[in-house]
Amino acid sequence: EVQLVESGGGLVLPGGSLKLSCAVSGFTFSASGIHWVRQASGKGLEWVGRMTGKADNSATAYGESVKGRFIIHRDDSENTAYLQLNSLQTEDTAIYYCVTGLRDLRNEMAVWGQGTTVTVSS
Amino acid sequence: QSVLTQPRSATGTPGQRVTMSCSGGTSNIGGRPVNWYQQPPGAAPKLLIYWNNRRPSGVPERFSGSRSGTSASLAISGLQSEDEADYYCAAWDDYVGGWVFGVGTKLTVL
């Protein structure tokens, strides 16, 4: 069974940084893309960004609201993906979900983790 | 404001068929496949429909999707109480260079 477990969320001051991790188990995800999606309390889903798999050149793309501040990277040897959050603002407060592609759906948002909560507040 | 437009709410009674729409443009739905996600209250989203009309294994046949032009729709037949959830459409957008979501439709089963 494919599982994604996010960690690293917490309370951070405005302007601060945080690094989220996403441990993937149940399959070798080197060929799959990894996405991050966030959801503020009571709001809808917002795509944060993605990194494709090695076969697709590990290409990154980011949503406009986080471009230049957030960075996605991955360690395929550890089956783990990361989201580095910099220059955090109160508007970045949300649940952050890690989402992976799978097989024929390698670049889709196919399997979701349970999320980790980031709170940006003074 | 979301790139993809969805009605904020929908309602139905057990056994009924309900549909919900997702409207976009030529840079997303018009040229890219649409996925649908189901998010029950307090839970993470789950892939429900991919590539406009395909169901992942484990998703009941009573869930179906379609796309026509720059719009897509999700239909649920034989509505059940456990279908009460938020439903989001999503597609890659060539103009913004990223994935875009609809605002989500909250389905209430009366």
Image (cartoon, coloured by chain):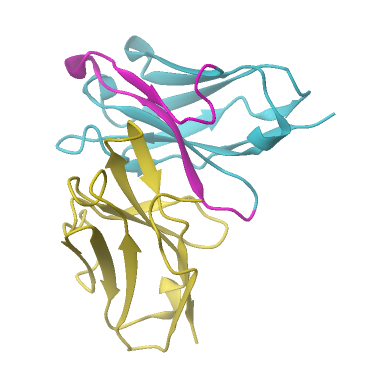
Chain colours: A cyan, B yellow
Where does residue B57 sit, x and y in percent of width and height?
20, 55
Query: Any magenta on residue A53?
Result: yes
* Closer to the camera in the image, A4 or B26: B26
Where does residue A52 sit, x and y in percent of width and height?
28, 22
Residue at the spot x=53%, y=26% of the render? A66
Above or below: residue A53 compared with residue B72? above
Residue at the spot x=17%, y=17% of the render? A55
Where does residue A65 sit, x and y in percent of width and height?
54, 31
Residue at the spot x=41%, y=72% of the render? B83
Q: Is residue B43 visible?
A: yes
Q: Quadrant of residue A94?
A: top right
Q: Quadrant of residue A100?
A: top left
* Closer to the camera in the image, A107 or A100: A107
Q: Which residues are magenta?
A: A42-68
Q: Is residue B59 visible?
A: no
Where does residue A2 sit, x and y in percent of width and height?
32, 37
In the figure, is residue A9 to the left or right of B97? right
Residue at the spot x=22%, y=52% of the render? B50
Q: Quadrant of residue B53?
A: bottom left
Above or below: residue B99 compared with residue B61? above
Query: Any magenta on residue A44?
Result: yes
Total labels drawn: 0
* Closer to the camera in the image, A41 or A75: A41
Above or below: residue A67 compared with residue A91? above
In the figure, is residue A22 to the left or right of B98? right
In the figure, is residue A80 to the left or right of B21? right
